[in-house]
Amino acid sequence: MTHPLRLLWLCSALFVVLGLGFVFFPGPLASLLTSGEPLTPAALTDLRASYGGTSFGIGLLLGYAALRPRYVVL
């Protein structure tokens, strides 16, 4: 396994974990990262969708790219 491929897998795993963290625990993660917790249900939903969904999707995309050697060109 080459260094770029390892880096791609690492980034994929980090994005997936961060995305799942924001989907399931948006309040504590927001408090940890910004020293403030969302106060309304709409804010929690926005955190889940914006940070959780986007990060999770990017992680899946990076994982898919790591499975396809032609996409690993560094």
Image (spheres, grey):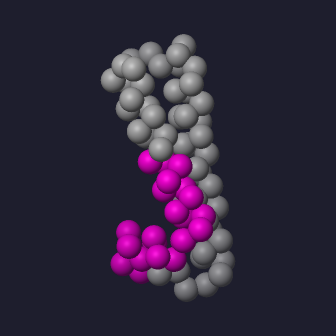
* Range shown magenta: 14-36
Residue 47: tell me if it is visible: no
Count of numbered tags: 0
Which picture quadrant has residue 10? top left
Membership of 3 in magenta stretch: no
**65 or 42, which lies in front?**
65
The residue positioned farthest toward the front in the image shown: 1
**Residue 34 position within the rendered picture, expressed as x and y whole percent measured from the top left:** 38, 72
Q: Left of 73 or right of it: where is 3?
A: left
Residue at (46% x, 72% y) in the render: 30
**Residue 20 position within the rendered picture, expressed as x and y whole percent measured from the top left:** 56, 58
The residue positioned farthest toward the bottom in the image shown: 39
**48 or 8, which lies in front?**
8
Membership of 28 in magenta stretch: yes
Q: Main secondary structure of the magenta part?
A: helix
**Residue 11 position within the rendered picture, expressed as x and y whole percent measured from the top left:** 43, 40
6 above or below 12? Answer: above
**Residue 62 position within the rendered picture, expressed as x and y whole percent measured from the top left:** 53, 34
Residue at (60% x, 75% y) in the render: 44
Which picture quadrant has residue 41? bottom right
Residue 60: tell me if it is visible: yes
The C terminus, quarter of image: top left
Residue at (62% x, 55% y) in the render: 53
The residue positioned farthest toward the left in the image shown: 3
**61 or 13, which lies in front?**
13
50 above or below 64? Answer: below
